[in-house]
Image (cartoon, helix red, strand yellow):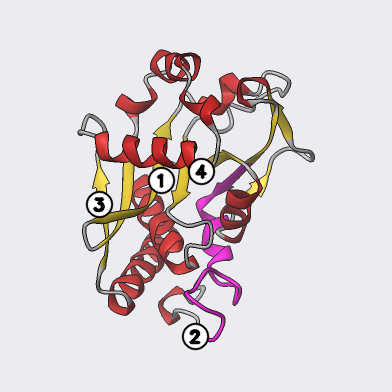
Amino acid sequence: MDIRYLQLTDCLQALQATLKSRYESYRIVTLEAGSDTREFEQFVARHFRLRLQHYMLTPKARLFETRLAIASRSTHFLLYLHDRPMAVLRVTPAPFEWASLTQQHVSPTVALSRHVEFSRLISHSQNQFPMSVNGLLAAATEWAIRHGHEGVTALCRSPQRRFFQRFGLTPITTDALHIEHRKRGDYWLLSAQWQQIFAALQQPTHLLANPSEKHVDECAPQF
């Protein structure tokens, strides 16, 4: 593996270790493709209903995911507080969900064919403290590197966009996309390769638990 990937992996592991050391009651569980994802799906469905996003749960929406075999091909990550799931994230290799949704956009699927798609980034609270989400993203990114992928893309709304951008993803499109299947809601398409994520984690504004905490020394840039 490229030395730069090893350095990024060390950085991602340090972020997860920091989460564990400071909040011992938190743990991250990885459900590999083919695992039982009922708890993940129940968590997502509950929060879609709470946020009045019922259009994500319609038969049409479920058929769309079935056609792309999203659930069966994806790896799912759950962040638990004790035994209660607090945040989730789904990681899917190509073909991507967004490539079929954003019909008004010429999707650069060839250039991103070695990426994974991050989706369903949902936390129990809209104000879930940043380090927990950061730890979840770090675990998923480490998994993607170990499995030979070259970067990440994400199709998301503005709240998730903020987390993804601070993690190193940048918008592919200059304006928000309006997704017909999702009530023409505003979505952003973002992307990053590993070196971009590594660079973002060097910034003092990266997602620590609170602004007073020091930057993680293990993530010092070396290339």
| Left or right relative to 128: residue 154 | right
Name the foreground residue: 23 vs 141: 23
Q: Residue at x 55, y 34 (%)?
A: 53
| Badge 4 element | strand
| Spatial separation of the CA atoms under disc 2 and disc 1 | 26 Å
Relative side of 188 to 143, left or right: right
Between discs 1 and 4, the one toward the N terminus:
1
Residue furthest toward the right? 174
Residue under pointer 2: 214
Q: Earlier in the sequence, mark 2 or mark 1?
A: 1
Residue range in magenta is: 190-212
Asked if labels 2 and 3 touch by Cβ distance under 8 angstroms, the answer is no
In the rendered image of this protein, does residue 82 appear above or below residue 185?
below
At a point 20% along the width and 33% down the height, the residue shown is 36
Q: Residues within 10 Å of mark 1 (few under 14, many from 20)?
A: many
* Residue 207 located within the stretch drawn in magenta: yes
**What is the distance, in whole Å, between disc 1 and disc 4 at their CAs?**
13 Å
Disc on the earlier residue, 3 or 4: 3
Q: Position of residue 54 (x, y in %)?
A: 52, 29
Q: Nearer the viewer, mark 3 or mark 2?
A: 3
Direction from residue 31 to residue 100 in the image, left or right: right
Q: Amino acid at mark 3?
A: Val
Q: Earlier in the sequence, mark 3 or mark 2?
A: 3
Question: Counting residues from the N terminus, which is met first, the one under dot 4 or under dot 2?
Answer: 4
* Location of mark 4 (residue): 152
Residue indicated by mark 3: 29
Q: Position of residue 148 (x, y in %)?
A: 36, 41
Q: Which residue is mark 1?
A: 89
| Amino acid type for the residue under numbered disc 1 | Leu
Which element carries disc 3, helix, strand or loop? strand
